[in-house]
Structure formats: C-alpha cells, structure tokens
Image (cartoon, rainbow, N blue to C red):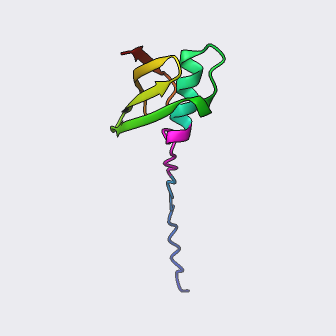
C-alpha cells in the first residue's frame, strides 16, 4: 500500500491600497471646508504641497487671505492658520 502525502499551503495575499487622499483637488476642498464662509474649492489655490509619511502640509490662497495648512496623510484632521 502506498502512502499519498498531501501538502497544503496557505497562501495569504495582502493588498494595500495606497490612495491619493492628499491630491491638490482634495486639499482645495478640505481647505475651503475648514475656512468656511461659503467658500468653494474652486476659490482656493494650493501650493508648496509637502507630503510626508504621516502628514501633509501646504499653503493656500483664498479670497479672504493666505493660509498655512496641515493635515494627517488622509486629510481627515485639517488645520489652517491665516498668515
């Protein structure tokens, strides 16, 4: 009688989606939301975008002034300070 050896392999595939939550368009939208006052994203210009490993910093210009902004990498916690 022959022995049949069965070998089972568990293959785990990890998929990581690296999104672009901090695109210029999203930064415009979130800056407008943070500043408020019926400001639309189209009225906000962003520049000097500095994407770090865990955060993003940028400069924003709006009709009511210029701002230094920062947020976490997914742009959930925005902080803008008027210059």
Q: Is residue 40 left or right of residue 23?
A: right
Q: Is residue 58 left or right of residue 5?
A: left
Image position of 37 with respect to 3: above or below: above
Residue 7 on the magenta segment: no
Residue at (50%, 76%) from the top-left corner?
A: 5
Image position of 73 with respect to 64: above or below: below
Residue at (52%, 49%) from the top-left corner?
A: 17
Q: How many numbered badges does the structure rendering display?
A: 0
Location of the N terminus (image quadrant): bottom right
Q: Position of residue 19 (x, y in %)?
A: 52, 46
Residue 17 on the magenta segment: yes
Q: Position of residue 82 (x, y in %)?
A: 41, 14
Looking at the rendering, the stretch of residues picked out in magenta corresponds to 16-25
Judging depth in this view, the residue of 11 and 74 nearest the camera is: 74
Residue at (55%, 27%) from the top-left corner?
A: 30
Image position of 58 with respect to 14: above or below: above
Q: Position of residue 76 (x, y in %)?
A: 52, 26
Res. 74 in view? no
Location of the C terminus (image quadrant): top left
Judging depth in this view, the residue of 42 and 26 nearest the camera is: 42
């Amino acid at each position: 009688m022959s022995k049949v050896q069965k070998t089972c392999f568990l293959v785990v595939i990890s998929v990581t989606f690296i999104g672009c939550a901090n695109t210029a368009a999203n930064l415009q939208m979130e800056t407008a939301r943070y500043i408020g006052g019926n400001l639309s994203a189209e009225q906000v210009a962003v520049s000097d975008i500095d994407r770090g490993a865990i955060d993003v910093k940028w400069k924003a210009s709006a009709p009511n002034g210029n701002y230094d902004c920062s947020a976490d990498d997914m742009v959930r916690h925005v902080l803008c300070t008027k210059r």
